[in-house]
Image (tube, rainbow, N blue to C red):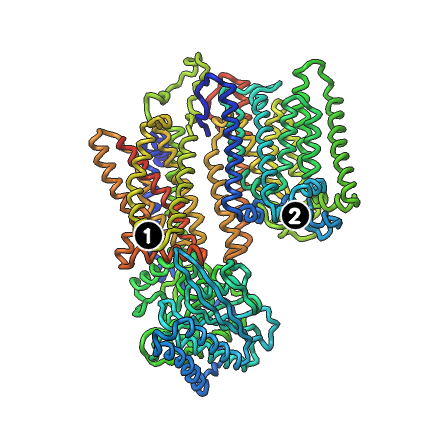
Amino acid sequence: MGTSWNQQPNPHPVMAVDRRKIAVFGAAFVLRLLLTCLFPSLPDLLTGRVEVSTPVNSFKRLQEGLFLYTRNVSPYDGGVFHQAPLLLPLFALLPDAKSWPLPTAIFYFLVDLMNAYALMTISASGQSVKSRLHSAVRKHVRWDGVSVAAWFLFNPLTIATCLARSTSVFTTSGILFAISNAVGGNSINAMLALGFASYLSLYPALLFIPLVLLCYDRRLEGPSPPSAGSFIIQHAILLLASVAGLLGLSCLITGNFWEFISATYGFHLLVPDLTPNVGLWWYFFIEMFDSFREFFLGVFWLHLASYVGGLTARFRSQPLFVITSLLGVFAVFKPYPSISDASLFFALLPLYRHLFPLMRYTFFAGSAILYSSLLGPAFYHLWIYAGSGNANFFYAITLVWSLGLSILLADTIFAALRDEWEQEHPEQVGTEVRQV
Amino acid sequence: MALKSAIRNLRNNPNLLYVRLPNLVSFICIVVGVVWLLLLPLNEYSRQTYISENALLPGQVHAYFTGSEQNIFRGYKKELEGLLNDGQARGGQKDEAEVTAALSDKLQSILQAAGLKVATQKYEYTSAGITHQGENTYAIIHAPRGDATEAIVLVAPWKTADDELNLNGVTLALTLARYFKRWSLWSKDIIFLIPPDSKTGTQAWIDAYHDMHPASVQPLPLKSGALQGALVIEYPFEHRFQTLHIVYDGVNGQLPNLDLFNTAVAIAGGQMGIGANLQEMWGHDDSYEHRLQTMFRGMTKQGLGYATGAHSSFMPYHIDAITLQTKGEGWEDEMALGRTIESLCRSLNNLLEHLHQSFFFYLLMQSNRFVSIGTYLPSAMLIAGNFTIMAIALWIRTGYYPESKPSAKPKNEKAPTEEKGTNTIVERNTIAERYLALPLSLVVGLHLLGLVPLWVFNNVFHQYFTTTTYIFVVVDIILPLLLAAILSNGLGVSKPIIPQQYHLIKSFSLLLLGLSLSTLATLNFSLSFMIGLLCAPLSFIPRLRGSVPFRLATSSLGLVLLNLVSPPAVLLGVCWYMGVSVETVLTQAAFGWDVWGMWTQVVVWCVWWPAWLIGCVLLGSSIF
């Protein structure tokens, strides 16, 4: 997957790059604005789609919580709202989305642009090609930050998530800012941002180990390196403190600590809502006898968490790559995945442009993802509206979607391993891989 | 051993592997797909229909609608006829609105006298500059044994699907309303709906029933429960009829559950002794040719996706519906039709849950013979698959198989040592760099461009449709050449394109086409099959090489042939062959888009047209 974006040298690099940046960000903003204004029913349509909105990020449910909150009722009464309470005062400041949709929409557009800005910072640091312990073989094959940002901003999945006003975008911001601060050497801010993301959706906490290693590697490049143990413990305490602070604030808002904990994190952990989504959990847990439920909940969560250890150990030299591949794992295996998780994974992939020549199945993975993104809505329609299909139709397609993502993920990991191997064996560059 | 060496030979011959073989496989896919469809009418591949839902019990009850009810029928008919003739006799003096109002009042008073709750609904639609308006009258029998959670609908439009006056049908509905009211056995409400025509009335009513109506349609003052099924009665002439014609196609090719059709056939044929026909096949002798013809007619209707009668509007709401039309000259009178409908209603009344047992995807080839989706789907999927095969082959070809010899590295280079000076590493069998930005943006851009004709053909006033079509024929001739010239020479807009990018453009375009068609095949098999066949040449369009006159001659000929299968040209051709005017067809299509929610146009302009355009651009680029 290679493009010839901006390959020619430019006489005024700074000016031109700035202009390109403005063009990309401006075009992304205008495109979103046009879509909202020309098709006023589009945001509500997308908000209702199961592929975009899950019980833990749906804007509709947020509205419900907001309604209760502004009327001084606990937002978790009624069991519809399962998102973090700090979102409520934030959205209470914005005008009502039903009668004044534009301010909320523009707020979301700006969050998207901020995320793209964070991506540009990550790309500019060059950590993806050259870090403390690793230096890629094909360093020269890479995209600049603007291309990476454009890839993120014009990704249809990102646009759909943004228009659907899914609250996942805030988790995405948390994660992206955590990474961009970490690669920038600002480890305290990185932990605060990760704390924010974990507070919103719980699962980003799994990124702690690779992220702290990334911060540690950056710190070692500077003067007066600390010892690894104390560095990690300090940052763990920092993360816990930031989460605790946010939880304390939430407690002030909702009043009842245990109610909101069980309605949000309990909901994430125990997966009681089996509304269809693009993930693998809902169908599995619908089919399961209740007596096995707890056991398999444990197994599924353990499975999700187990990737952290393995990938971190194997790719110790490339913590940023561990984060990228973990985000791919989350997009497939987390309990309530939506296309926003896939869009976050796709956002970080172009940082590894130098691995693309080593990847073998991009076209097949891309085709599988394209096929499933067309067939998914069609089969959902057949199941829910036309009544001529059934749940198996949609589940089969979510399997294909997950398969496409996993192929892409496995292929990326293969390419990264191959890259490491070629670095160690320069004489073997370009030889064919053979399974033995 | 022979096989192994054959495979080894194939690997060593990239031209065969990446150029010849995919062409051959694609071609075989198309041929097998078509042959597959042609095999379906044979006894070995089609199946006898059967009633799957046991609760229906078709024809197990005695129908009592006879004798004295005929007098009621005659009386009602006389009253309605009187009003109609009154309007006609005074001609200019009394305008149509007054007659309609008088008829509506009469209907309401008759239904009220029979003890039903009556309501009306006004509506208005505007499409292609034409305003359609009317008023629905409907009445509800509340089930003595039910709780108003389920209902059956009986529809008798004033105008049939062929725009004839359906006086007998309306009268029969009124008689049945009075007759049904006196029975105590109904467990579902029965709704009698009398819309002014077959195109708009039921659509307005069913939209409003589900609160999905636009602002120009009034809401319903009176409602019942979830609709379980709908029957439309058409009896547009005075003499006795011979057979019943069952129409079952819905909007966008959606079909009612096969059980409903089977029940109608079983009751008409088995219980009442009236023959049942479908797809206007009057002299069906169950031969292969007639079965195939029936299937093709069904596929055409399904593929075009328009509403074939008042029943079609029910289908998008997952309400199974059919139209019963009386045809021919024979022995059967309105009482026989009434008994058939009574028996059908009794069967539907038996239902314990929504019709779900039988097939929703089927092709009928005789009133008692069908093929189900598992048997017929492979044919459309094979045709859609041929595009995907070509797309994959082209993708691999751009990466592994050097197109232009000098720029690519020599094939048999073995020594890894040399050429390390300039920072480039010799990669012996990794893939070549692909330049995707231009192909991706071109393919996506042209697909978005399809929105322009989509908008134009749905929003132009109806009198300009013919002109617009001819303009588009001309645009379709010029636009590909223009694009090809820009791509080949740059013309200062961009850098000239390299051969690899042509393959990538074609690969992406075919990938999208294959993708859309295989998705479409699960929703509307026939449309996917038709578009797939019309697009089949696009798989095999090469970018010609050779001397200038040869390229010029061949690609011009190819472009002329391709222009013959362009969307507007096909439209004109079909209209000419069928003897209907382009304006009528396009007005109907715009009406379908505005009112019925028909999306055939989206497929034509956003799937077929861009793929066709890209094919033409590739062929046209051989000239420059």
Subunit under mark 2: A
Identified by mark 1, the residue type is Tyr
* Number of the label disc, if any, that sits on residue A394: none
Q: Are marks 1 and 2 on the same chain?
A: no
The reply, left or right, for residue B322 in relation to residue B542 is right
Q: Quadrant of residue B149?
A: bottom right
Residue B102, position as x, y percentages in the image: 45, 76
Residue that numbered label 2 is attached to: A63
Whole-number angstrom distance, CA of label 1 to CA of label 2: 47 Å
Q: Nearer the viewer, residue B208 or A81?
A: B208
Residue that numbered label 1 is attached to: B464
In the rendered image, the quadrant that contains the C terminus of chain B is top left
Question: Measured along the vertical axis of the image, is residue B112 above or below residue B292?
Answer: below
Identified by mark 2, the residue type is Gln
In the rendered image, the quadrant that contains the N terminus of chain B is top left
Residue A141, position as x, y percentages in the image: 49, 22
Q: Nearer the viewer, residue B535 or A155?
A: A155
Rate crowding at label 2 as few (under 14), some (14 to 19) or many (20 or more) other CA atoms within 10 Å: some
Q: Residue at x 57, y 40 (%)?
A: A162
